[in-house]
Image (cartoon, rainbow, N blue to C red):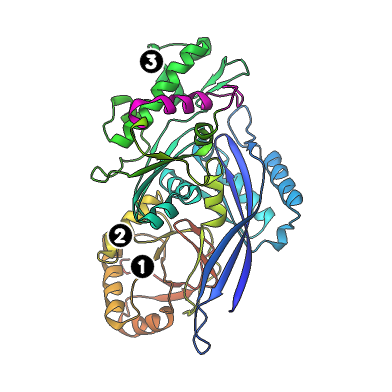
Amino acid sequence: MNTRQLLSVGIDIGTTTTQVIFSRLELVNRAAVSQVPRYEFIKRDISWQSPVFFTPVDKQGGLKEAELKTLILAQYQAAGIAPESVDSGAIIITGESAKTRNARPAVMALSQSLGDFVVASAGPHLESVIAGHGAGAQSLSEQRMCRVLNIDIGGGTSNYALFDAGKVSGTACLNVGGRLLETDGQGRVVHAHQPGQRIVDEVFGAGTDARALTVAQLGQVARRMAALIVEVIAGTLTPLAQSLMQTGLLPADITPEVITLSGGVGECYRHQPADPFCFSDIGPLLATALHEHPRLREMNVQFPAQTVRATVIGTGAHTLSLSGSTIWLEDVQLPLRNLPVAIPQDDADLVNAWRQALLQLDLDPQTDAYVLALPATLPVRYAALLTVIDALTTFVARYPNPHPLLVVPNRIWVKRWACYCAHSYRNFRWRSSMRWSCGRETISTLVRLFLADRLCR
């Protein structure tokens, strides 16, 4: 069997913690000897994972770039891996960290010094999906053919990803997390983030000084946070929950059969610390409140495969897939990097499926740069080719965008497709194709891709 291995690294810079993992990804060529190579991933094994570190931030809330780089390089050394030996990598910055003033420049500089990395400042939808994959909720849903809701509860947000038979059917994000109130080792609040202060004000009245709260009162705040998290599951939100939503709601007509909790608070839910302030926040108190919540106790809550490492594992081991092997190339500057890939879940209505996929990536169809993937189920037939071209024509007419239109299939479509279109659709100005691999539902170093100018200019 013709197999190959890749070494991949995933780095998650979150609100509270930063983590690094290295994964061995095994590919196999499924094509016959006489055919164009068609590689698929058959194994994704984590070969090394770092301890969980606190994300280094300054007093103004910005990332400490030098300290962050030193921390991550130390993990390469501890794993015995040289940066130049890494084949692919992804850095994702999530939660409140993604909102800091220097988040994007910091991770871009980091990626350039560590290798050929994909970089994403993850919005709430993307973070939810990545965490759901990393926690194992997607695999559980696919294996059991059931609906699984993963809630990744971190320091600043709770990210919901609903999987139905392995496919994403909804995502949501609530601005509630365990580090919205930071404490000292004795449980005295030293800093209240704005969403945390809003919850304090609702529980104890407007203008309450969070720094004056007792341990018992912090328990009350944690119970209100737990209730807010459960409200999103049920779809019946109080005004406070509505004001803390970072996205729309989960689909109202789909009830999860299994619920999993990941993230730092999910880890505390699974293994409750003896010291409730061991992390200098109220995360353990929130986990206890979730255990005690009467409605959650009635639900089928199961422990996921991963908790605190869900996002970094999703980043390092579940964000890479491969496109087809044929190309079309005419006069374009390559490579193009760090472009999100919108993967449609339905091939019956591609235009709306692409739009929904873009929304899950927190992207605007008319302003952001992105890649449209073709469904894996699409047959390599002339009729399907015409269907795709009609869908692309409709899409670019409905969502005009100043960026080039990028399309990537996972089959050997591109050459025959581009040749046909160049002859029959001359208002497409065919520009390019690209080379190597593309991210799944996330970010890509774009591969074997074909590129056309927008129709509607």
Relative height, residue 381 to residue 341 (above, below): below
Q: Position of residue 382 (x, y in %)?
A: 30, 83
Question: Residue 285 colored magenta?
Answer: yes
Circle 3 is placed at which residue position? 203
Residue 366 showing in the rendered view: no
Q: Can you say which quadrant of the picture contains the C terminus?
A: bottom left
Give the percent coordinates (x, y) of residue 317.
Answer: 55, 56
Q: Earlier in the sequence, mark 3 or mark 2?
A: 3
Helix, strand or loop status at disc 3? helix
Q: How far is disc 3 from disc 2 in space, using C-alphas?
A: 41 Å
Task: Name the foreground residue: 189 vs 78.
Answer: 78
Residue type of the residue flagged with mark 3: Val
From the viewer's perspective, is residue 133 above or below residue 158? below
Quick one: which residue is furthest to the bottom in this view? Answer: 34
Mark 2 to mark 1 CA distance (whole Å): 10 Å
Q: Which mark identifies residue 353?
A: 2
Task: Give the number of the disc on residue 375.
Answer: 1
Q: Which residues are magenta?
A: 273-296
Q: Residue at x 33, y 25 (%)?
A: 240
Q: Is residue 267 above or below residue 425?
A: above
- Residue at the spot x=37%, y=47% of the render? 148
Q: Are marks 2 and 1 in contact (CB under 8 Å)?
A: yes
> Type of residue at label 2?
Ala
* Number of numbered labels in the structure image: 3
